[in-house]
Amino acid sequence: MRILIVGAGAVGGYFGGRLLEKGIDVTFLVREGRKKQLEQTGLIIESVHGNLNLTPKMILSGEGAEAFDLILVSTKAYHLEGAIESFREYVGETTAILPLLNGISHFERLTAEFGEERVIGGLCFIETTLDSKGRIIQTSAKHDLVFGERTGERTERILKIEDAFIGTKVGYRLSDNINRDLWNKYLFIATMSGITTLMRAPIGPIREEPSGRAVIAKLLEEIVSVMKRAGAPFADDAVGQQMNQIDSLGFAMKSSMQRDMEKLSQVEAEHLHGYLLDIAHRKDIPVSALGAVYANLKIYERSL
């Protein structure tokens, strides 16, 4: 299987590096600056699961290459359009596209561009960052990747993708219900990023303050009501399950969106919270907490 990783950043670089470590045919589609950096240093991963220094195959967008069997996309939502243009020419008749973005709305864009049959469901749970030297730093035990056909079928291509990950140092899982998994992660991410950016604090102090905990619960209830109206396949106790997950987080845990704000970087306000708010407005669902989260993020964006 020939795999193209779009970018060699904190997420794509990590999972691509683990595949390359196993000996899978992996190519990274990178920009000129990152290409020069990796040519000088190699692809460096510093991880609790084992360090790596690899010599990756790389191409720049527009350079000749045959179509790939699998294209893994792990960009931020605000870079999706540029990513699509960069890998479009490497999509063939049987190419599968596996996005690892947070949220749901990117599936609409990818399927509109490449067709329903090419786009596989995928998500990941990993804490990684790219340091100032271009090294991928991964410090927590969790480095999980979940994927599956959005139809729920166990197709030949999805089994080949699973086979590529067998034997890697990745906590992979082939899902029979990737749509449910995607909505559950979206619910968690939208709530966690929403409350931590709104309060400008890690999750621990927020949930220990009674009024803060009440806001978490209200935000969860609002988002679940919106997602259910959008067809999300949640269990009846979805709010309780998510509160249990939030309670299990470390006291100092921050969302990646909060860390982006602290670095004065772009955030995925439209992709995550704006998408839900639009559904709420169209379906006349009251969402005061979600509205406050979105307003806070938009005010932040205007300050950049």
Image (cartoon, grey):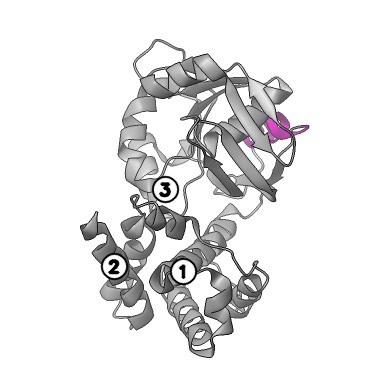
Circle 3 — which element?
helix
| The magenta stretch spans residue 158 | yes
Q: Is residue 103 visible?
A: no
Which contiguous range is marked in magenta? 156-167
In the picture shown, does residue 119 fall above or below 239?
A: above
Distance from label 1 to label 3 (Cα)?
Answer: 26 Å
Pick whichever of labels 2 and 1 is earlier in the sequence: 1
Q: Amino acid at mark 3?
A: Phe
Q: Is residue 161 left or right of residue 99?
A: right
Looking at marks 1 and 3 on the same chain, the residue that comes earlier in the sequence is marked by 3
Judged from this view, the residue extending furthest toward the bottom is: 210
Q: Position of residue 154 (x, y in %)?
A: 67, 42
User: Spatial distance from mark 2 to mark 3, Cα to Cα?
Assistant: 17 Å
Q: Residue at x 39, y 60 (%)?
A: 272
Q: Main secondary structure of the magenta part?
A: helix
Q: Is residue 219 magenta?
A: no
Tag 3 or tag 2, which sits nearer the N-term?
Answer: 3
Question: What residue is disc 1 on?
Answer: 196
Instruction: Compute the Cα span from label 2 to label 1.
Output: 21 Å
Q: For the residue carrying disc 2, how many other residues have a C-alpha within 10 Å: few (<14), some (14-19), or many (20+)?
A: few
Looking at the rendered structure, the secondary structure element under dot 1 is: helix
Foreground disc of the pair 1, 3? 1
Vertical relation: 204 (above or below) 208: above
Provide the residue designation for mark 3: 107
